[in-house]
Amino acid sequence: FGSSSSGVPRQTSWHAFAAPVATSVMRQQWAAAAALATFWCAEAWQCSTDVALGPVAIAGQKGLALDDNSMRGCPWRLPASWPNTGTDGKGATPINSLRLFKAWDRNWQERQRLPVWESLRDFVASHGAKIFIGSPVTCDSKADEQDWTWVKKLIQMLGKDQVMGVAIGNELDILWQKDSTSSACVHSLWEEGRYWGEFQRRVKELDSLGLGSVPVTAVFTGN
């Protein structure tokens, strides 16, 4: 902020530059704040139709699998009821559960994680729904550990009563078919017991966090 040999010009040129920059930064911050505010303010998405297909059979045992794009892109617009089960938004069968394939992804923007999780928390709290969360066990133990850390944090944010269960490992029976899976990794997981050891460790960690009542399982394709 010092003055130049000619006095004012240096300050004047500095302010002339700083003002639009500051304004631009503030605009970006305001836009970001407005965008994030929608995570908390928006209600569950609904549509109206005059085509009613009747109630969902055994609705309490069904739910939606939340795809990655919806989870990170518009978690505040999740449907609260099954399509075509009511008329003009009335009498629709509510959606009671969501399946998350992952808590977060390391390729997604970190600054979006908490707003997305808070939207999920608000959804389950508002609609009495539960979430089934997946946590992979793969040949990339470092990535697995990061994912598991996110899973634990998300469960603590949601509250154990809103968690239907935790899957430790996803599509384990076809893991060997993936390009990133080596024969040595398969041998380590199954023959040497790495998967079972990992399963037991994660269960103990859930117990230590006071989440001993959260059910655990593993996901297989059934092929």
Image: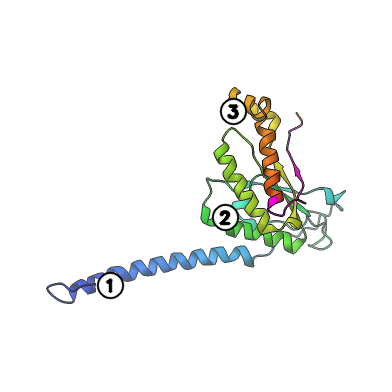
Q: Position of residue 172 (x, y in %)?
A: 69, 32
| Residue on which disc 3 sits | 181
Residue 59 against residue 19 in the figure, above or below? above
| Residue on which disc 1 sits | 15
Res 177 seen here: no
Callouts 3 and 2 close, C-beta under 8 Å: no
Quote the CA–CA distance across marks 1 and 3. Answer: 58 Å
Q: Quadrant of the N terminus?
A: bottom left
Looking at the rendered structure, the number of numbered marks drawn on it comes to 3
Res 196 seen here: yes
Residue extending farthest bottom: 8
User: Of 68 and 222, which appears nearest the observer?
Assistant: 222
User: Of 46 and 159, which appears nearest the observer?
Assistant: 159
Callouts 1 and 2 close, C-beta under 8 Å: no
Quote the CA–CA distance across marks 1 and 2. Answer: 36 Å
Tell me where the magenta segment starts and ends, as one range: 208-221
Quote the CA–CA distance across marks 3 and 2. Answer: 28 Å
3 or 2: tag closer to the N-terminus: 2
Using the rendered view, name the quadrant where residue 76 is placed: bottom right
1 or 3: tag closer to the N-terminus: 1
User: Residue at coordinates 71% horizontally, 58% vertically from top-left?
Assistant: 159
Residue extending farthest top: 183
Whether residue 210 is in magenta: the answer is yes
User: Residue at coordinates 64% horizontally, 54% vertically from top-left?
Assistant: 154
Q: Position of residue 174 (x, y in %)?
A: 68, 29
For label 3, the SS is loop
User: Residue at coordinates 67% horizontally, 33% vertically from top-left?
Assistant: 195
Q: Nearer the viewer, mark 1 or mark 3?
A: 3
Three-letter residue code for mark 3: Thr
| Residue on which disc 2 sits | 113
| Residue 115 tag number | none
